[in-house]
Amino acid sequence: MSNIQPTYSHWLDRWIFTSFPLSAEALGLYRILYASYLLVWGIPNFEWITNSPDAFFNPPAYSIAAFFSGFPPYWFLQGLSLLVVVCCMALLFGWYTRWVSITLFIAIVVGKSFMFSYGLIGQDLIVWLVPLFMAFGNWGNKFSIDEHKNNNHSANINTWPVTMMALLLGFGMFSAGLPKLLGGWLDTSTHATRGHFFTQYYVIGDLKLLSTWMINITSPIVWEVMDWGAVFFELLFLAAIVKPRWFRLWLLLAIGFHTTTFLIFNISFHFQYIVYLLFIDWGKINPALYRRLEGFTNSLFSIKWFVLAVIIYLPLYMLAQQFTQQPGTLAPSPFIMATDLLGLDYKIVMGISALLAAYVVVLWQLTSKPSIK
């Protein structure tokens, strides 16, 4: 396994290129986890946009949709949605990984530009920046079809994209905290968190999890602590990227922050957790586990199995579109279709599953010792 040693004299160079050293095996494992997450928990779907009348078409000035005079036809949106699915499958198998990663990002940007054309704002952009940056990290070198085709196996592993993702995540959190600071969240005479909670409880009507319990809490101290905690947690996220240990600690706090948001406001940020996994110290995995994974992928990751997987998954994807009751912005994956058939709330299932997985990974990080020096 690769061993990256600091060889840069300037502190900024060292921070960019050596903050998050990862081996080819670690990046390959993360690529598999990332693609699996998308295929199991749902992929953005754009077919529903065709039901929107052109009177609602008001694209942002600087977007791909601005070059159009109205919403595109159904066949275009369906083709774009299917392209995203196929790209995710190719990413899982690691076939032409760099080009597939870039294509996936472009397809998402095109589809999202039409989603934003009538005011819908998404919070998952950071998820789709991962394939764009990791395309240049060469995350298809191991556990992939590319490894055996030798079309990029010899490429060097670049870890600067991981540092750039940490920087973008820090800026994203900072941009969420700064408006709160300027908007008076630290004013002890008001309770901004409680105001948002009342909106969620009485206007939107989400009465699940801990919301019916929180409605009875009137202590100003509790609500003010939540106001101050949210502001300083988001503002200091950017400062935490200076050291990987600080950043991983802040990721642990982020999981707790998202847990609170999920339990009280019924808002699931499950899509954030797959991004957080990028910064895990995968060097703590025993090399024997990597060897077992290599044996598994060597037997299954081939063009033949990739084509078979696409043939099996696409009909399930289309079938789920007909029988799944869920927001149209999320592709009806077979997993979510199963939750509907069982009468379960997919948001709760996804949120709890993601939280448990995130906490398991963090506890493993805190209790295990590095295996790769």
Image (spheres, grey):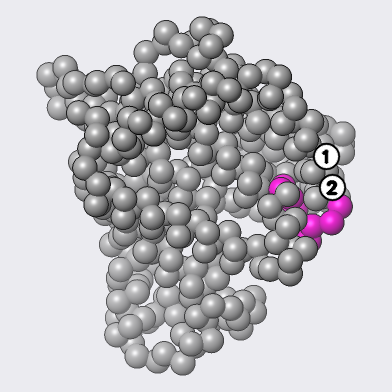
Q: Amino acid at mark 1?
A: Pro
* Disc ID at residue 315: 1
* Disc ID at residue 319: 2
283 magenta-colored:
no
Q: Which residue occupies the foreground of this view, 127 or 232?
A: 127
Image marks 1 and 2: residues in contact by CB distance under 8 Å: yes
Query: For this view, does 344 lie left or right of residue 190?
Result: right
- Label 2's element? helix
Name the image quarter holding the N terminus. top left
Residue 17 in the image: x percent, y percent?
26, 24
**Image position of 304 with respect to 56: above or below:** above
**Image position of 229 with respect to 334: above or below:** below
Q: Which image quadrant is residue 171 in? A: top left
Q: Which residue occupies the foreground of this view, 213 or 170?
A: 213
Q: Residue at horizontal 83%, vertical 43%? A: 318
331 magenta-colored:
yes
Q: Amino acid at mark 2?
A: Leu
Q: Residue at horizontal 52%, vertical 63%? A: 352
Query: For this view, does 38 lie left or right of residue 77?
Result: left
